Amino acid sequence: MKKIIRYFSLLIGLTASFTSLAKEKISLMLDWYVNPDHAAIIVAQQKGFFEKNNLEVEIIEPADPSLPPKLVAAGKVDLAINYQPQLYQQVAEGLPLVRVGSLISSPLNSVVVLKNSNIKTLADLKGKKVGYSVSGFEDVLLDTMLRSIGLNNQDVKLVNVNWSLSPSLLTGQVDAVIGAFRNFELNQIHLEKQEGVAFFPEEYGVPAYDELIVVANKNSLASKKISDFLTALEQATTYLQNNPNDAWQAFVSYKPKELNTELNQLAWKDTLPLLATKPHQLDTKRYQQMAEFMHQKGLIQKALELKDYAVELQ
C-alpha cells in the first residue's frame, strides 16, 4: 500500500513539474510587416525574454493591415498591434477590443516637407498640395494642425497618394504629406540625398497619444499570460536601451535578408527613444483626452468611457 501511495505521490509531483515547464502559447498579429517599430517584440523573442516569462509567442505578419484588430475581436488571435486613435473607432463600432499595453508611447504621425522647398512654417502650406494615404483620422489631424494657425483643410489641396508618401514628395507630385512617420519617412528621404522637415501634430493642437498599442479581446483579460507578455516587453525594452548595438544584431537575426537594411538601421536609432518603457502603464488622462478629441471631431458618435477601451493589467 505504501508503495502505491509513493508511486502516486511521485506521479503527481512529475505532473506538476511538467505543467510548470509547459509554456503558455500566445499569438500576436503585428500591424504590418516587421520593422523597427516592433523592436521590443522581436528582441523579446530573439533574446529569450518571452521564454523567461514562460511564454511561447507566435508572431504573425498580416496580409492586410486592417485584419489584426478584427481577428482579435473574433478570437482568432490573442493580441494585436493597433493604433490608439483607431481603437476608439473600432470600439465605437462594437468590436470587443481593449488596450492592454503600449508599444510606442509617442505619436509617429507627422506632416513632412522637403527642407529645400519654400515651406518653412505650417502656414506656408496655404494653397499647396498635401498627400495622404488614409482619409478619416489623417484629414482631422491635418485640419486640427492648420486650425491652430488660422487655416483649415479648405486652404490646401488634399491628394490621395496611397502609400507612396516619400516618393510623391520627392517627385514633386505634392508639396507635403500627412501620415509620414517621423522615424521612417525622414530617413527614407535622407537616403535619397534630400532632407525632410517634420511638423508634429502634438505641437499644433492634437492631444499626444500612443502611436502603437497592444490590444486584446475584452472577454479574455483574465489570462495571466497577457500580463506576462507585457512584462517580457518591458524587460526587452530595458535591454534595448542599455544595449542598442547588441539589440540591433538580435533584431536583424530574426529575418537577416529583410531587416538588415540601411533604412532600418537609421530608423532603429530614431525609434528606440520612442519605445514605451512601461508597457503596462496606462495614462488615463491622456487616453481620455484623445477620446474626447475623437468625439469633438466627429470621428466617433459619443465619448467613450475609459473602461470601454483601456485597462492597466497587474
Image (cartoon, grey):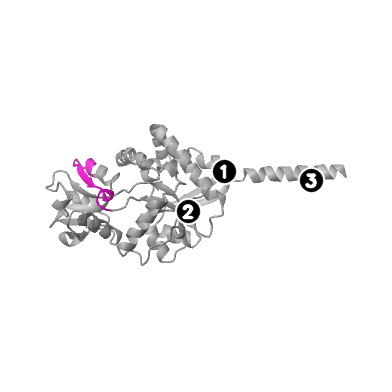
Seen in the picture, residue 82 relative to 74 is either above or below; the reply is: above
Rendering coords of residue 115 (x, y %): 16, 43
First along the sequence among labels 3 and 2:
3
Q: Which residue corresponds to mark 2? A: 311
Determine the secondary structure under disc 3: helix
Whether residue 201 is in magenta: the answer is yes
Residue at the spot of label 3: 8
Disc 2 versus disc 1: nearer the observer: 2
Magenta segment boundaries in residue numbering: 189-205
Could you tell me if residue 249 is visible in this image? no
User: Is 123 colored magenta in this rendering?
Assistant: no
Residue at (15% x, 53% y) in the render: 125
For the residues labelled 2 and 1, the Cα–Cα distance comes to 23 Å
Residue at the (39%, 54%) spot, across then down:
287
Q: Amino acid at mark 2?
A: Val
- Is 297 left, or right, of 242 in this rendering? left
Give the amino acid at mark 1.
Asn
Q: Quadrant of the N terminus?
A: top right
Q: Reading the chain from its start, which is encountered first: label 3 or label 1?
A: 3
The local secondary structure at tag 2 comes to loop
Q: CA distance from mark 3 to mark 1?
A: 27 Å
Residue that protrudes farthest toward the front in the picture:
285
